């Protein structure tokens, strides 16, 4: 294989992967409650987002479209699975109640 072609392909691959961001926000959503449950959040994961605004907007949209008329959500920052059936997050954000 030509060295120039190999370098070009390597640069393209590196450039393509360098532009992708890892989602930092995790959306937790419960459709039938007005308040997020305490404790294990893993069963309530509803998506992953790069920006807080995206996460909050998706949660608000899901509550609005809920058939039960209820729903609650919060977004966790840099969440990790603790291997014990729960998820630990550096912090949580939610829209304050009006």
Image (spheres, rainbow, N blue to C red):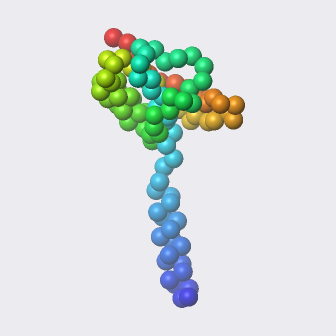
The quadrant of the image that shows the C terminus is top left
Number of marks = 0
Q: Nearer the viewer, residue 22 or 45?
A: 45
Q: Position of residue 8 (x, y in %)?
A: 49, 77
- Depth order, front residue of 97/38: 38
Residue 52, by quadrant, is: top left
For residue 22, above or below residue 92: below
**Occupied quadrant, residue 72:** top left
Q: In this view, does 71 lie above or below 5?
A: above
Q: Where is residue 80 in the image (x, y as percent from the top left)?
A: 62, 36
* Residue 51 in view of the camera: yes
Q: Is residue 15 above or below residue 22?
A: below
Q: Is residue 83 left or right of residue 89?
A: right
Q: Residue most toward the bottom?
A: 2
Residue 29 at x, y = what percent? 45, 26
Residue 24 horizontal side relative to residue 98, left or right: right
- Considering the image in quadrants, where does the N terminus appear? bottom right
Residue visible at 50% across and 83% down? Answer: 5
Which residue is at 47% across, 70% downward? 12
Extreme-front residue of the structure: 67
């Amino acid at each position: 294989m030509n060295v120039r072609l190999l370098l070009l392909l390597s640069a393209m691959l590196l450039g393509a992967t360098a532009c992708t961001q890892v989602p930092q926000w995790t959306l937790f959503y419960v459709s039938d409650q007005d308040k997020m449950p305490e404790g294990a959040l893993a069963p309530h994961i509803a998506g992953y987002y790069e920006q807080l605004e995206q996460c909050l907007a998706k949660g608000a949209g899901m509550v609005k479209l809920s058939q039960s008329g209820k729903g609650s959500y919060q977004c966790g920052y840099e969440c990790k699975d603790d291997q014990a059936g729960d998820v630990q997050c550096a912090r949580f954000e939610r829209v304050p109640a009006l």
